[in-house]
Amino acid sequence: MKSTLLPVILSVLILFSCSQEKELFVNEKPDETRFTKITLIEKLDEPMEIEVLKDGRILFIERKGKVRMFEPETGLAKDIGFIPVFAESEDGLLGLAKDPDFESNKWIYLYYSPKGDVSINRLSRFTLMDDILDMGSEIIMLEIPHFRGCCHSGGSIEFDSKGNLFLSLGDDTTPFESDNYNPIDERSGRPENVDAQRSSSNSNDLRGGILRITPQPDGSYTIPKGNLFPEGTPNTRPEIYVMGNRNPFRISVDPKNGFLYWGEVGPDAQFDSLQRGPRGYDEVNQAKEAGYFGWPYFIGDNKRYWYYDFEKKESQFEFDPEAPVNNSPNNTGLKTLPPAKPAMIWYPYAESEDFPLVRSGGRNAMAGPVFYHDLFPKTEVKFPKYYHGKLFIYDWMRNWIFTVTFDDNGDFVSMEEFMPSTEFDKPMDMQFGPDGSLYILEYGTYWSAQNDDSGIYKIEFNPGNRKPTAKASVDRNQGAAPLTVQFSSEGSSDLDGDELGFDWDFYGDGSIISKERNPSFTFEKKGEFQTKLTVKDKEGAFHQVLIPIVIGNEPPEISIDLDGNRSFYWGNPSIKYKVHVMDKEDGSLDDDGIQPSEVMVTWDFLKEGFDKIEASEGHQIVENTTQLIGQNLVLKSGCNACHGVDNASVGPSYKEVALKYENDTDAVDYLIQKVINGGGGIWSERLMPSHAHLDKEDISLMVDYIFSLSPNANLYAKNRIPLEGQLKLDQHVDQGLYLMTASYKDKGADEAKAILRRHELGLRHPKVLAVEADYFQGTAKVSNQGSTLIKFTENRSYMGFKGIDLKHIEKIIFSIDPNKVSGWFEIRMDSPDGPIIGKTAVLGMENRPQNAEGRWFEIAVPLNAQDQVSDLFILFQTETGVDIWNSFLMNTIYFDNKK
């Protein structure tokens, strides 16, 4: 009996264990660390679309005409064909799809702009023979008239599960003749591409629509049932499934229910217009059945445009989404159109009130695949059930990916960002491979360029052991030989809690010299090295990081003498200063080894202060701290989507802008307004979007950074000051930061590269917000009437400030909103346990001063006289119970120089 029962029990336990394993990550969102982005191939030339084959190979196309095949065994891509294309503007080799029976028939479909004098775009079928594109096998299936020049070609190809081919086509219309509202210029004698009514809202024109056809073995096609217009309907094209599109650039079809999704690239109008209609929006659309989606009469959730008479320059009426009518003389189709369907998701350049998660800035919406867990075999990398039935959408400009959740009817419920901490560089196409992992094609930073950061990547899911995260830092990474460097692995971790091993390869030559967590090493050799730290877990999973080390050149030393406090200013003083620079190899300012002209000293005033930027030594590419702030703001703003430092893209390079305007005294104000309002026509017809959501002072810093890229920037910098003199602090009213930056780039030594060093000194107003502190422990940030306040929520909770000059500071005054709890503040130097230099009671509500007006009153803490720079901590202690409900609020802290 026992021998029979035991196997049964074991079988039940095994089945139970397996069923439990299958249930992982069904309702619980997987942590981002369970996904790994793997580079397959990079440095592609304008890649457009991909097709992942069953054997793991990847077909992809490049806009200039190449058809290529990536081989995972070699990690290389080979050219398998070339289509001669017209590759100007938005044309070229645009779309790719493999036949549903590709494994047996080797057919692929390409959508392209054929080279030659005839202005058309073409859908053709080709055959691969021994993995080479057989040019003689081309069967032309469709040819679409196309106005070469501008704009909107579309070109995405997808198949549904029934063998129907979908092809997206742009409206073939310029946005630049209609102020980026709806292009409906009907005047005779005008170019044909100024009226989208001739295409998108023309039932007898394929452009501005998404077609659905059924390819046949002989290369012809039939029309499936359910398209927008039944075959034989006068003045219509039966191929049309969806019409009323502007530029449906990427489409996808749900493999189970057949729903069509696409990203609609919208117009550039920055603001709503009372005479023209709504501002521009990008859209993500869903078509459960054939339909009309409104362009150029409606946008977003059917926001209405006006009929605008371009001859009379007047608006006459708003279009009606329930009964749209196309009366354009350029319309060859039906006048009465189906009711317009609204977008599923829509968002403008500015922050969206309807979909706030999508952020702001440039936009280029695209639709990716819908994932179904049961359509893929069990593999170690397949996405989990959590994503079952979710749609992946992405934005080419904003570099994000979201997943969309639907209800049982297929209606939008919610969206959430996918891998928000992972960097994507212009995602261009994506699809799930046969193993259930996600393949992503990235276009790279610049338009119309062969980008180093373009490539094909694979996102794999890991439900089991996760590799550790390696972190490495040094106390210094440059200097003369011999150089002793203290290394640290602090921050290295393993999310599964595994014990970790550490391998240090200091010279980067493969030799493991230390296995300590935090070793010290003396470099005797001169040169540039990449120290490698490898962190391994107990199962052998590992992660590596590199630290550049340069031996042979000692960095310059810069200091600033200042007559007064080095943290704060009081009143409108005039302060003496002097800059000192010394370099082991070059000499110093005092011995003429360094010339004054080689040292850059600047003096700036920032009305709102700034968030201190930490840049690693040896990697600073600007000499002025305000320029570094401006550079950081440029990176955050998304401007690099259209501009490069040296490379022109959609717009000019930053250096071109700096050179064009360097002698224009009004250029700074002009460019600030240009960034705020947007516009075009200076460099090309393409418009720069408005950045009205950015702070004007931030934009000023961005413009200053751009001008700093001019070769003559340092000679004529408006904020440059001598190496010594008097500083006038007279630009503030009640707030603001004065910032001095001194920088010097040495001459290099012993074949080691030159080193730029920068020293900064900031003087700020003595009244600071508590929330601006650098350290917090046991505190909470509380929003209150538009302000963020600090609440001390436990005994020995504290806040602290880095590097405060205590010279001349007699007392600190806190602005407090009392509550039930009482206790005392201790002002400590260096650390929360450091020397006490001040102490005072914190009273509860019942003990508030009689002269206190309103809810707030001040507590002053006299300080013992100090003459040093130190971290400063404000420690709260109490002998009564304290929590988030009964504790007081702190708003401001004033560092007072008066007794």
Image (tube, rainbow, N blue to C red):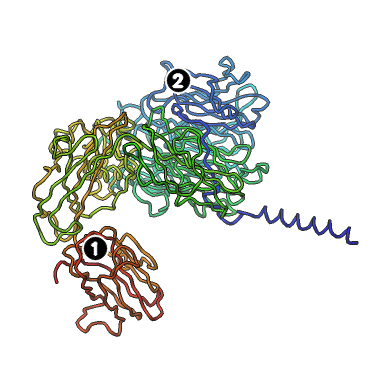
Q: Position of residue 714 (x, y in %)?
A: 17, 36
Q: Position of residue 168 (x, y in %)?
A: 49, 33
Query: Who is closer to the viewer here, 765 or 434?
Result: 765
Q: Position of residue 693 (x, y in %)?
A: 29, 50
**Mark 1 crowd level (few <14, some 14–19, many ≥20, 10 Å Cα):** some
Q: Residue furthest right?
A: 1
Q: Secondary structure at mark 1?
A: strand
- State the mark number for residue 85: 2
Determine the image quadrant of residue 586.
Answer: top left
Distance Cα–Cα, label 1 vs label 2: 62 Å
Residue 435 in the figure: left or right of residue 554: right
Residue 298 in the figure: left or right of residue 800: right
Q: Quadrant of the C terminus?
A: bottom left
Residue marked by disc 1: 768
Residue at point 17%, 51% (across, down): 605
Determine the image quadrant of residue 645.
Answer: top left
Q: Is residue 207 above or below residue 611?
A: above
Residue at point 23%, 59% (across, down): 869
Q: Exactly how many numbered labels are in the figure?
A: 2
Of badges 1 and 2, the one in the foreground is 1
Q: Quadrant of the N terminus?
A: bottom right
Q: Is residue 244 visible?
A: no
**Mark 2 crowd level (few <14, some 14–19, many ≥20, 10 Å Cα):** many
- State the mark number for residue 184: none
- Name the N-terminal-most of marks 1 and 2: 2
> Residue type at mark 2?
Val
Q: Is residue 1 visible?
A: yes
> Residue type at mark 1?
Val
Query: Who is closer to the viewer here, 793 or 333?
Result: 793
Q: Position of residue 846 (x, y in %)?
A: 30, 85
Q: Secondary structure at mark 2?
A: loop
